[in-house]
Amino acid sequence: MTPRATEAARALRTEICRDEETFGRLTAEWTALYGRCSSATPFQSHAWLHSWWLSYGRPGALRVVLVRREDGGLVAAAPLMRARGPLPALTQLGGTITDFTDVLLDDGCPEAAPALARGIARAARGAVIDLREVRPGAASEQVFARWRGPRRRLPDSLCLELPAVPMEGLLERIPSGKAQRVRAKLRKLDALGIDARVVSGDEVPAALDRLLKLHQLQWRGRGVTAEHTSDRFAQHLTRAVRPMVERGDAMVTEFRLAGDVVAADLTLMSPRLAGGYLYGADPALRARKVDVATMLLRHGAGETSAGGRATLSMLRGTEAYKHHWRPETVGNQRLMLAGRGTAPLLWLRAGAADARRWAARQARERAWVGRALGRLPGRAPHSGGG
């Protein structure tokens, strides 16, 4: 950074917000900054983050780093908190229910990144900064690039992404035989008369209640994600999604058959991407041989492409059904930063992360081998014994 740029960065002032009521009052200026950060995803909206904190935050742990110009204008923000655990660390708000985490940087203020890096270092105070699920191209990479202390970049979750084109464009990505079968499924949907309707903001609470009930119904007996059945998750979604729908950062769609809601979908959106976050479907649709995933994808592709976005994200996870569309695999990152005197903590935390990732990979490989051996002709599963 040039001396002039360094001087400009030092003219910015940083502050640390530790109070949830003060955090709540940042709505307007946080939303304005979110609009000036081109890499932001819906998970960086104030509605999502503040609602998450109200449901999942711990008293005394909030550490939101803010960078302001001399006139008070907000040019950077890092939504952080003190993490639980034996090693002191700052992590980002959002937890495991958030697919992408990031900081916000004003695109028109190049001095914001080094100023935010200094502010984060001050907020850490002897703790490691551990930024999970950072999407390639995220604003956090600018902070990482300007960090003066030790740092580590590790792989995190894999995501699958498609171009934001209408359904016909997605069909061109797959072999012609498969495309013909998908078209047959779409004709069946049209013949059944399933109608898709995007709900308005004041309808969101009731629509989300129906979505969550359908989600639990579709996974009954098949291991539903426990958190998706919790009251705090339902409260978080209801608080967050209504303002997001009103600002164009989310869309709730209900699919009706003969007047009854048989499926519902929550899609989160930013100017660059949209991602299907959660859906629920009546198991009776399977009896009618309705391909729910294809139904949701057609609607999502149409809405995403019409909105001028570039990416239709399938968010985290590499489930087999997603690969039918030949998506691009994009790896999230885990960025670790150490301030003065905390380098040993960084290496300990990074080493623990490497060990967990190795153990998970070994478990996946053993499971794959077990399934492969079980499919071999003439081989019965091993029953143990002496």
Image (cartoon, grey):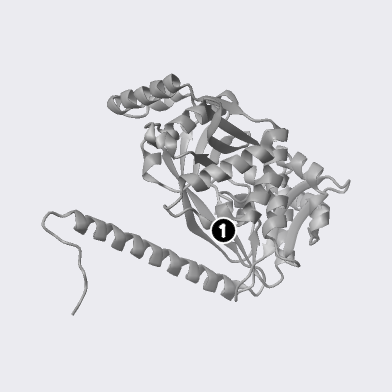
Residue 26: percent from left, percent from top: 81, 48
Residue at x 68% of width, y 53% of height: 52
Quarter holding the C terminus is: bottom left
Is 315 on the left or on the right of 76, as rendered? left
Q: Can you name the residue that lies furthest to the bottom here? A: 386
The answer to whether 207 is drawn above or below residue 129 in the figure is above
Is 78 on the left or on the right of 166, as rendered? right
Residue 162: percent from left, percent from top: 46, 34
Q: In which quarter of the image is residue 59?
A: bottom right
Residue 235: percent from left, percent from top: 68, 50
Residue at x 70% of width, y 67% of height: 124
Q: Can you name the residue that lies furthest to the left here? A: 378
Give the structural element (helix, strand or loop) at label 1: strand
Is 89 on the left or on the right of 71, as rendered? left
Residue at x 69% of width, y 30% of height: 200
* Residue at the spot of label 1: 335
Q: Which amino acid does label 1 sit on?
A: Leu
Res. 94 visible in picture: no
